[in-house]
Image: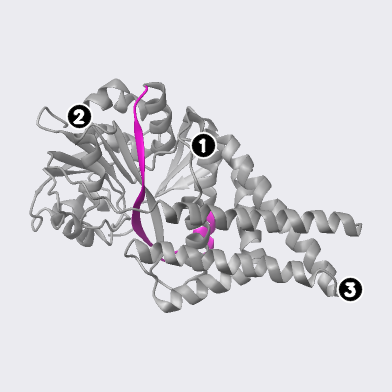
């Protein structure tokens, strides 16, 4: 490879890292904790499966919300699902009403979506806000108020936030997922229909908007509640608000193989429902990785381009330091050991990019996705079939 091409690839990799830093700085400048709070009657829908080891903590977090929920509807596939028994257990100590719904098995959609549909049937005229949440988050005390208040003051029809991966155990998979997912979370977003993303782990929608977008039907024949909701909301002309400071902690303790499978599933969903975003990730990560490879080759073989390697590493470490500052500003600072590992992964950016690139490529080729105990065969955005149901994990 000629020296000129090495320079071009090095420059492109440096530009990607510099733009990544600029994106984080832009988000930091717009971080503002929610200040306005409104009272509202809000029902929370929580689809669950499996053993749900953190369910008590989640219910306790909902019990201390500044805006108390009217009720929590926990929805499961069947009474044989361990989540069913766990839901009955937590009803006894919750300070609010908990209803448990059995949805039945899905056949041509994600089981999570079928569970959500079953719970939506219980929404009534008393509800002023419908909130969808995931069971693996640790919501702040102001979480529900921050989601619901923009609905009540008329600023939005649908409100969502962002998942913020927090390392719960020092495992390589957990650190890699945190590094990659946080970078995606902090990317600047434009309010365009094609870029619209609704994170199903924290969504609030008014009943009127839910009817306008046919919320229940939007969950038919889809693997992704997130992106299907975004598409239907855009088609219905709803005002969607993504609150930049609403970063909801999601503890992760994934091992390396588990992290790889999780990331492949997420990118597979993106490849199906937002293919251009998949292509953007594919080009960006592989281009930067190629830049690293040619630069390191030059350093090791001729001692040239040491400046480029040092600059790439420095920018990557600065980016990780800024990500840590974002966490601190929203009252979720990483413990020092986690911070040091994250900074170290910045220094080892090419290894992170190898993992990331393998995930992106695998997501484009796989047609089978395991989510929980269900294995799905995917032929297209609205062609989802349940191929296999594995045994539930032991209670």
Mark 1 vs mark 2: give the one in front. 2
Asked if residue 227 is positioned above or below residue 72 in the image, the reply reads above
Q: Position of residue 256 (x, y in %)?
A: 53, 65
Q: Position of residue 319 (x, y in %)?
A: 55, 63
* Of residues 188 and 385, the one drawn nearer to the viewer in this rendering: 188
Asked if residue 72 is positioned above or below residue 225 in the image, the reply reads below
- In the image, 303: left or right of 269? right
Q: Which label is found at residue 105?
A: none
User: Mark 2 sits on what residue?
Assistant: 121
* Of residues 328 and 83, the one drawn nearer to the viewer in this rendering: 328
Quadrant for residue 324, please give it.
bottom left
Asked if the residues shown at circle 2 and circle 3 are in contact, with their CB atoms under 8 angstroms apart, the answer is: no
At mark 3, the secondary structure is: helix
User: Mark 1 sits on what residue?
Assistant: 377
Asked if the residues shown at circle 3 and circle 1 are in contact, with their CB atoms under 8 angstroms apart, the answer is: no
**Other-residue count near label 1 (Cα within 10 Å), few / some / many at <14 / 14–19 / ≥20:** some
**Other-residue count near label 3 (Cα within 10 Å), few / some / many at <14 / 14–19 / ≥20:** few
Assign the N terminus to one quadrant of the image.
bottom right
Q: Position of residue 158 (x, y in %)?
A: 30, 34
**Disc 3 versus disc 1: distance between alpha carbons?**
49 Å
- In the image, 344: left or right of 212? right
Residue at image coords 22%, 39%: 102
Please give the range of residues in magenta: 237-262
Q: Is residue 255 visible?
A: no
Q: Which label is found at residue 302?
A: 3
Residue most toward the front? 29
Quadrant for residue 334, please give it.
bottom left
Asked if residue 148 is positioned above or below residue 321 in the image, the reply reads above
Residue at image coords 33%, 53%: 32
Residue at image coords 45%, 74%: 338
In primary-sequence order, the first of circles 2 and 3 is: 2
Q: Position of residue 377 (x, y in %)?
A: 51, 36
């Amino acid at each position: 490879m000629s020296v000129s091409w090495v320079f071009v690839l090095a420059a492109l990799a440096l530009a990607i890292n510099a733009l990544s830093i600029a994106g984080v700085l832009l988000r930091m400048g717009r971080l503002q904790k929610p200040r306005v709070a409104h009272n509202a009657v809000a029902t929370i829908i929580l689809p669950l499966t499996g053993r749900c080891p953190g369910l008590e903590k989640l219910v306790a977090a909902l019990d201390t919300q500044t805006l108390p929920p009217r009720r929590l509807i926990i929805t499961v596939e069947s009474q044989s699902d361990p989540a069913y028994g766990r839901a009955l257990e937590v009803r006894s100590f919750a300070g609010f009403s908990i209803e448990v719904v059995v949805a039945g098995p899905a056949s041509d959609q994600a089981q999570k979506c079928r569970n959500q549909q079953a719970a939506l049937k219980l929404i009534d005229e008393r509800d002023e806000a419908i909130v969808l949440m995931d069971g693996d988050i640790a919501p702040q005390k102001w979480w529900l108020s921050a989601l619901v208040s923009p609905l009540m003051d008329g600023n939005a029809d649908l409100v969502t936030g962002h998942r913020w991966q927090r390392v719960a155990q020092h495992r390589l998979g957990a650190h890699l997922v945190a590094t990659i997912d946080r970078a995606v979370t902090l990317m600047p977003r434009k309010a365009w229909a094609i870029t619209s993303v609704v994170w199903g782990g924290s969504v609030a929608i008014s009943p009127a908007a839910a009817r306008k977008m046919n919320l229940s039907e939007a969950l038919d024949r889809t693997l992704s509640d997130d992106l299907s909701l975004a598409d239907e909301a855009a088609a219905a002309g709803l005002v969607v608000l993504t609150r930049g400071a609403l970063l909801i902690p999601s503890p992760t303790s994934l091992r390396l193989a588990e992290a790889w499978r999780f990331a492949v599933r997420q990118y597979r969903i993106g490849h199906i429902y937002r293919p251009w975003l998949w292509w953007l990730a594919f080009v960006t990560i592989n281009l930067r990785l190629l830049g690293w490879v040619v630069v390191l080759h030059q350093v090791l073989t001729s001692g040239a381009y040491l400046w480029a390697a040092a600059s790439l590493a420095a920018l990557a470490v600065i980016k990780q330091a800024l990500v840590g500052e974002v966490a601190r500003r929203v009252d979720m600072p990483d413990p020092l050991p986690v911070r040091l590992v994250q900074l170290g992964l910045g220094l080892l950016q090419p290894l992170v990019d190898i993992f990331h690139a393998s995930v992106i490529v695998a997501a484009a080729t796989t047609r089978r996705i395991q989510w929980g105990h269900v294995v799905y065969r995917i032929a297209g955005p609205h062609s989802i079939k349940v191929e296999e149901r594995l045994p539930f994990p032991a209670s």
